[in-house]
Image (spheres, rainbow, N blue to C red):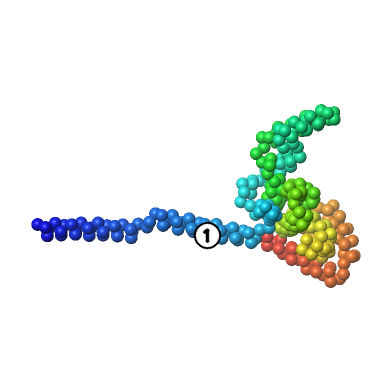
Amino acid sequence: MGKAIAIIFSTVIIIIFTFFINHHLSTPSTNFTQKAIITTSTNQANDHKIEQADNQKALTLNNGSNLSVISDKPQHQATVSELLNKAKQIRVCSNIPQTDEEFSAWLETAYQINELPDRIVNVTDKYNKCKRNPDRNALYLDFVISAAEKGSEDAISWLWFIDGSELIKQLNLKNYKREEQRRIKQQFIELKYYLSETAALNLNETAILKLSNAYQHLDPKTGGQNYVKSLAYSDFFMQITKSNDLYGKVKWQRDRLEQRMTHDEIEQALTLTEQLLNDAQNTLAQ
């Protein structure tokens, strides 16, 4: 009897053990699978970030923040019109009182100096609208850059309109050391040229005109003038524009520029023009 019980007990143990083994061989551990998925996703995300970082240019501040050309922020999905409208609204809001206390103080001063009623009404209206604007404290430059990425001629023009003092105000750099301010200004200049050159290859005439003029005064890579690039972009513009009026103006400027150049420089510019035309053709074919 005892022997029979022992056999039954052993059989039950074998059955349970077999079930346990078969179950774990056929069904992976849920925790292990989830961990593998998370690890793979994280690695892929990191690889994407590294690839993205290698190909992007950004304004990097010493507090670690930056204005990226390539952005995964919500505004990256917005239309050019939406981006520029937001930028304009934010810029307006940045030039009026920011808090109720500041607005009350401004209003009191306005009455003391007999400010024009229309001016008071205008600022009051803007202040009330800005209070309801969730983006009022955002960087309008971020929206302009995103619009420029999308090839907006208005955004390209806006970038060239921003000078050093506007950049310091926009990025709140007034308390930064001069060396840091210069570094960030230089990054912005390089970014402006980079976005314009990218837009130029998509036959953005505004960008081409800006570059043809800008390179006469500054090449950010060398810190000096670059007549070769200026002449090349002028010829590039004349090759693609359909405006007779602009063609004539650029040709006049181009001919004057050529008179200040050596024969070798002119030849280099012609070669660069051909390269720009080929690059633009390849870009548009993609």
Which residue lies at the image location 68% right of the left edge and 50% below the top edge?
146
Which residue lies at the image location 86% right of the left edge and 60% below the top edge?
254
Picture coordinates of residue 178, whole percent (x, y): 78, 55
Q: Can residue 230 be seen in this view?
A: no
Residue at numbered disc 1: 43
Q: Does 56 appear above or below 128?
A: below
Horizontally, is 36 left or right of 177 in the view?
A: left
Looking at the rendering, which quadrant does residue 253 occupy? bottom right
Instruction: Tell me the quadrant of the picture where the N terminus can be found.
Output: bottom left
Instruction: Tell me the quadrant of the picture where the C terminus can be found.
Output: bottom right
Residue in the foreground of this view, choosing between 241 and 56? 56
Q: Does 113 appear above or below 271?
A: above
Which residue lies at the image location 76% right of the left edge and 48% below the top edge?
174
Picture coordinates of residue 80, whole percent (x, y): 68, 46
Picture coordinates of residue 127, whole percent (x, y): 72, 34
Residue in the foreground of this view, choosing between 214 and 106? 106
Which residue lies at the image location 66% right of the left edge and 46% below the top edge?
79
Picture coordinates of residue 248, whole percent (x, y): 86, 55
